[in-house]
Image: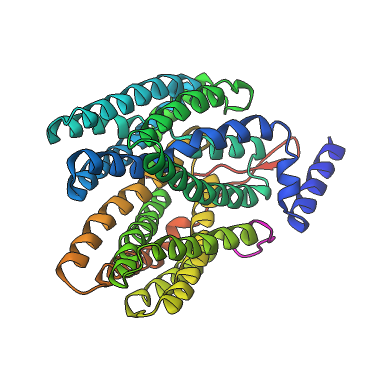
Amino acid sequence: MVSAVTNESSKDASELSRPGYGRLLRTRGAWTFLLPGFAARQPFAMLTISIVLLVQHTTGSYGTAGAAAAVTGVSMALFAPYSGRLADRYGQRAVLVPGVLVHTLSGLTLTALALADAPLWALFAAAVPTGASVPQIGPMVRARWAAKLQGRPLMSTAAAFESVTDELTFVVGPLLATALCTTVDPAAGLITEAALTLVGGLLFAAQKSTQPTVSAAGHARVERVSALRVPGVRVLIVAFLGIGAVFGGMQVSLAAFSESLGEPGLNGVLYGVFAAGNMISGIACGAIAWKSAPQHRLVVGYAALALTASGLWAAHSPLVLAGLGLLVGMSIAPALITGYTLVDGLVPAGARTEAFTWLTGAVALGQAAAVTVAGQLEDRFWDGAGFLVPMGGTLLALVTVVSLRSRLAVRQTRTVARGVGHREPVAVD
């Protein structure tokens, strides 16, 4: 037994000194859920732009298209945490299979209604279940990492890896959807999204060996403790709302800025620089053996995000805006990664998928709100006024994070069983 403890300690020490991606990807069984998970999460990034392009084509109105997409985003943000809670209670497969089927049917129904020039209320009626049933593949993959790594130091590297994967998804997905809608057919993006959801989601659900186990004790725990009851999770939700405000505000404001210069194609370049900063920073974060507490890293990272986002509105040249966008992107990744890493220590294992979906939903909700507000500011005030949304969102979230940072500290109780200390998160109210 002493030998086992020594071996475990040596393994943890090795991970601390070399927390790289190579060691992470050699985790037994990782590739069985990573590959289908990557395919299954692509539709998530295609959905919004596919709806916008299709509905705008059939109605001639960006306002109507944006409203339909916003309904989908808000529905996803509101229903995703309940999907995560059910996955924690009954298992990911039990929730994912019916969810994939509902989403595919709803997406195809929305496509048919748009092509049939259905009234706006009918589009909204189809958009609600389409958004509510979006498969939460990212949170489910993160929950599988948490179950595999069991609080080991590589969890921070896994969070970084997932952040980079998410960013890659949000680069590839919109490009694929746009290409399909503009070169094949306006409905091709949404149809492809539904097909990928069906195939990728079912393949991911088939990987039963890597999904977190659900026991009778786990059922009782989920009934007793919801992730939302953990004070630290509520603080993280506010932080992720601010991050969503950056994504939404940047999308609208960069498009308006490029349009004001008479160079609409510049929008893709500027947003690509922003996304590249996020990816580069995320890769770097996963390769570092952090010694500071994650709650301290979140405060520092979020302060950097608020500072860089606060300068966007003052940029008047593409070069300056590209530089600031790169810095903003580089500041987002540490905040995202640290937030997801904190979940592993703050939330009981039986509620982690729910916690991850609360954070993912917070980003989606913040993005939907930011798109709406930034669009209004761009219409009513000067070009670039929409950049006030990322500034306001991150500053308000920073105040919350700094004021309530004590709630992000992992409270641990140490008990001894067979010579090994065990951690039990107890930060609930």
Q: Is residue 194 visible?
A: yes
Above or below — where is 409 with respect to 35? below
- Is 30 or 102 nearer to us in this picture? 102
Above or below — where is 93 with respect to 28? above
- Residue 109, by quadrant, is top left
- Specify whether 38 is left or right of 361: right
- Is 244 or 322 nearer to us in this picture? 322
Residue 364: image x %, image y %? Answer: 35, 47
Q: Is residue 71 visible?
A: no
Whether residue 291 appears in magenta in the rendering, the answer is yes
Q: Count how many numbered circles sit on residues in the image.
A: 0
Residue 388: image x %, image y %? Answer: 28, 70
Q: Which residues are magenta?
A: 286-292
- Residue 149, by quadrant, is top right
Residue 54: image x %, image y %? Answer: 29, 39
Q: What residue sits 84% from the left and 44% below the top?
A: 6
- Specify whether 395 is left or right of 382: right
- Is 72 or 242 nearer to us in this picture? 72
Image quadrant containing the N terminus: top right
Q: What residue sits 56% from the left and 37% below the top?
A: 38
Image quadrant containing the C terminus: top left
Q: What residue sits 46% from the left and 48% below the top?
A: 175
- Specify whether 201 is left or right of 80: right
Q: What residue sits 59% from the left and 62% below the top?
A: 280
Whether residue 215 appears in magenta in the rendering, the answer is no
Residue 243: image x %, image y %? Answer: 39, 58
Q: Name the residue furthest front.
A: 183
